[in-house]
Amino acid sequence: MIKKLFLPFVVIVGFVGFVVYGRMKTAPNTAIVPPLSVSTTPVPTVTSAFVASPPATGISPTATSGQYKDGTYTGSVADAYYGNVQVQAVIQNGVIADVQFLQYPSDNGTSAGISQRSMPLLKSEAISAQSAAVDIISGATQTSQAFQQSLTAALSQAS
């Protein structure tokens, strides 16, 4: 009885292995990207130098009762390994009202997919935190760190 089941089992395992191997061989540049999740580990402080640029619009900064001066501030371009990240912070009534991505990694399908999933999370967390101290997104570490760096540069102009 066991001998009769052994041969079909070996054939099935061999077929599954052949299919998996074939998929890996036909798509060598395709990375399997796990679903993104937000890390709960503390974010290190970004200490790189940056060049402050003037507000990107004709809006002149004005003091308000919030943490920042109203206006639109463009952060520095930060390298995310697979492409650059640059953000623009919109400050209204002294708080971060919006964060817009001016540049993000999108040169290949994997980078574009990671960016499309991580950008809304980074944006919403920055608005909630009212700072660039956001959690690193699992699967988008370099993009998250570049986002923090660019947003830090933008917010330093608004301080």
Image: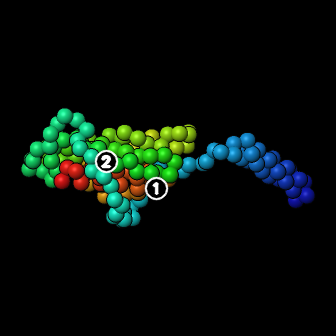
Residue drawn 85% across the image and 54% down it: 10
Is there any visible trace of residue 67 in the rendered image?
yes
The image quarter in which residue 108 lies: top right
Quarter in which the N terminus is drawn: bottom right
Residue drawn 85% across the image and 49% down it: 11
Report how far apart the C-alphas of labels 1 and 2 lie in the structure: 19 Å
Judge by depth and name the residue closer to the eye, 148 or 5.
148
Q: Earlier in the sequence, mark 1 or mark 2?
A: 2
Residue at image mark 1? 141
Judge by depth and name the residue closer to the eye, 57 or 6.
57
Residue 53 picture location, percent across and down? 27, 46
- Report the disc number at residue 75: 2
Within 10 Å of disc 2 (Cα), the crowding (few <14, some 14-19, many 20+) is many
The vertical placement of 121 against 141, above or below, is above
Q: The residue under label 2 is which amino acid type?
A: Gly
Is there any visible trace of residue 148 in the rendered image?
no
The kind of secondary structure element at disc 2 is loop
Residue drawn 54% across the image and 50% down it: 34
Q: The residue under label 1 is which amino acid type?
A: Thr
Q: Is residue 78 left or right of residue 81?
A: left
Residue 141 picture location, percent across and down? 46, 55
Within 10 Å of disc 1 (Cα), the crowding (few <14, some 14-19, many 20+) is some
The image quarter in which residue 46 lies: bottom left
Residue drawn 41% across the image and 46% down it: 85
Residue 116 picture location, percent across and down? 45, 40
